[in-house]
Amino acid sequence: MDSYFERTENGITAQISLKEGLAEVNHAMMDGRRQVRTMSSGRTRHAIEYKDGRKVTLALVDTPVTEPEEWGSAATSLILHKFRGEGSTVRAACNSSIRWHPRPLSRTEGPRLQTRAELEAGEYAHLRPFCTRCEKR
């Protein structure tokens, strides 16, 4: 998940990085505590009221990272599995012992992972079933 802070200062909202938000909270708690009138801090929300009248609210926002669903078949079966991972750790969603290895076929492009829509649009889509356990994950 990607995270960032929504910083609201006197009604004006801006998005700032996680590092900048935590630096402001740390400054209000430590070095700049003499400039702070009140401060309330929780796990995902921080409210700072400065002596000069500024009111700052920092709210942590998580954005889910969507990974494209990539399907392919392992060397041992014709069932299409949903694979996750990178490099040498590409494994099936239903069973971590099922691995996918890209192997080039005699100087041509080897097998590759495809989206489900690409596989269903193929000529031989009716011959290769999708793994039902992978679909649920």
Image (tube, helix red, strand yellow):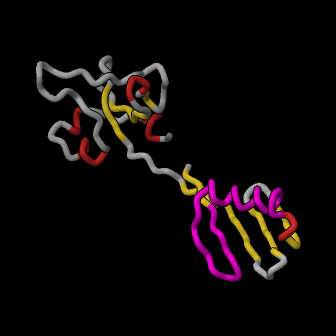
> Where does residue 86 sit, x and y in percent of width and height?
41, 31
Q: Residue 103 occupies which quadrant of the picture?
A: top left
Query: Is residue 50 magenta-colored?
Result: no
Question: Where does residue 133 sit, x and y in percent of width and height?
Answer: 47, 34
Question: What is the tally of numbered marks visible in this picture?
Answer: 0
Query: Vertical placement of 7 versus 71: above or below?
Result: below
The residue nearer to you, when weighing 20 against 117, is: 20
Q: What residue sits 83% from the left and 59% below the top?
A: 29
Q: Position of residue 51 (x, y in %)?
A: 84, 77
- Counting from the top left corner in percent of width and height, residue 78 is at 29, 25
For residue 84, what is the image quadrant? top left
* Residue 6 lies in quadrant: bottom right
Which span is picked out in magenta? Answer: 5-32
- Work out whether residue 116 or residue 55 is closer to the camera in this orientation and state it: 55
Report the side of 108 relative to 72 (left or right): left
Q: Is residue 11 magenta?
A: yes
Q: Residue at x 45, y 35 (%)?
A: 134
Residue at x 31% of width, y 32% of height: 72
- Residue at position x 32%, y 22% in the image: 101
Horizontal arrangement in the rendering, residue 30 relative to residue 92 (left or right): right
